[in-house]
Amino acid sequence: MDGRLVFKDIYGLSFQLAGSRTRAGGVATTAPLWLTQFTIQHRVWGLRSLFAGISDDFHTASGFLGRNGIVHAYVDPSYTTYGKAGSLLQRLTGDIVVDGIWQYQNFIHGRNIQDQKLHFNVNTTLRGGWNVGAGYFVESFGYDSALYANYRLEVPKSGGRLDTIPFVGQPTIGNGEYIVQIGTPQWKHFSGGGFFLQGHDENFFEWASADLLLLSLNISYRPTDRLRNSFSYFWQQVNRRTDGSLVNVGRVARAKIEYQVSRPLFLRLVGQYIQDQTDSLRDDSRTNAPILIAGPSGVTRTSASATNLFHVDALISYQPVPGTVVFAGYGSDMLDEDAFRFRGLTRTGDAVFVKLSYLFRL
């Protein structure tokens, strides 16, 4: 059951209530899912809020749920002020996000919250269409043992031998980080934007505090009405706070070219490069012991890994009349020896895509 109510033009209330009933081994399990959202969309004052929960036992025979067994709530009030016509500052909006996540059973039984977030944000619109924003985030993440159920530690034992023991992380990790972002006006041929985030964040690989760096850039160039080019770059790096060593770095560069040859004929070419490098894991927050992963074939020690994947997609689209469609595409995956060097590329997979459609009119 779901619905949406709007009253006095600026207030909105959305709600959703669902249940699943699953029978397995002669036992039937019933579990709820709920969601409510309340919003205020005033010219000066605003509000977004959410209260949602998904039971651990909620199962879907079809569809997809990103994460079961949590209760999520947040409230985000905002205030907007406007500048005079022609002034440098056209609009300024400030908001404060108070966000919390509970494990479902902890919430039902009145136990402690797991994750807490407090975000302070300021966003401005400047003369000419520029957008500039900044924010500071204060967060605390609680240890979720279910996420690290297959983690083990290798520790010294008497007699010079080694022993394998369960991994137990510290109860909470506190974070503090800032973000700055910018967006250009939507010019006739060009637009772009991006953000930069840096600070103390959680190292989920080892469940420890870390130094986090995020960078995102996107550029769009439209030299003609028929030709469109875009480029995006994303960089994420996690370093240990104890000694500054690298835990993980991931970089994604993506370029896309689209050309409308004529009304029915369209061409698209996409190239994407994904670099991912991860160090061998250790218990950085407590013992510095090596982390092992338990799997079906036994317990293995983590080792440093690196992947440099280059992917190319090409597509031809032909739609002469409504209902008649011809799509033909080709994709290829290639591994690079060194990141962004394009030397010694080894093709690992190819795919061909064809779609034909014709509408018969009687």
Image: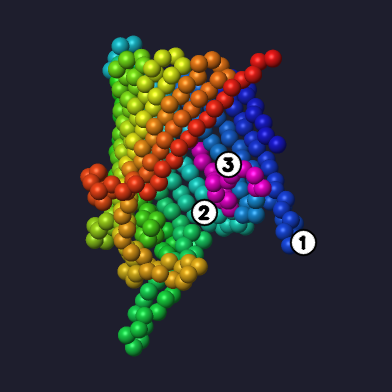
Quadrant placement of the N terminus: top right
Residue identifier under label 1 = 26
Where residue 213 sits in the image (x, y, percent)?
A: 29, 46
What amino acid does circle 3 point to? Phe
Residue 74 on the magenta span: yes
Q: Are marks 3 and 2 in contact (CB under 8 Å)?
A: no
Residue 51: mark in rendering: 3
Q: Which range of residues does the magenta coloring cover?
A: 60-76
What amino acid does circle 2 point to? Ile
Q: Earlier in the sequence, mark 1 or mark 2?
A: 1
Residue identifier under label 2 = 113
Quadrant placement of the C terminus: top right
- What is the spatial separation of the Cα atoms under label 3 and label 2, in whole angstroms? 14 Å
Q: Secondary structure at mark 2?
A: loop
Task: Sort mark 1 into few (<14), some (14-19) or many (20+) by Cα contacts within 10 Å.
Answer: few
What residue appears at the point 69 percent right and 51 percent down from the top-left corner?
A: 31
Of residues 3 and 356, the one drawn nearer to the viewer in this rendering = 356
The residue most toward the top is: 85
Horizontally, is 173 left or right of 342 in the view?
Answer: right
- What is the spatial separation of the Cα atoms under label 3 and label 1, in whole angstroms? 34 Å
Q: Secondary structure at mark 1?
A: loop
Q: Earlier in the sequence, mark 3 or mark 2?
A: 3
Q: Is residue 89 above or below residue 116?
A: above
**Any part of residue 283 in sight:** no
Where residue 215 sits in the image (x, y, percent)?
A: 30, 40
What amino acid does circle 1 point to? Gly
Q: Secondary structure at mark 3?
A: strand
Residue 30 on the magenta span: no
What residue appears at the point 60 percent right and 57 percent down from the top-left corner?
A: 105
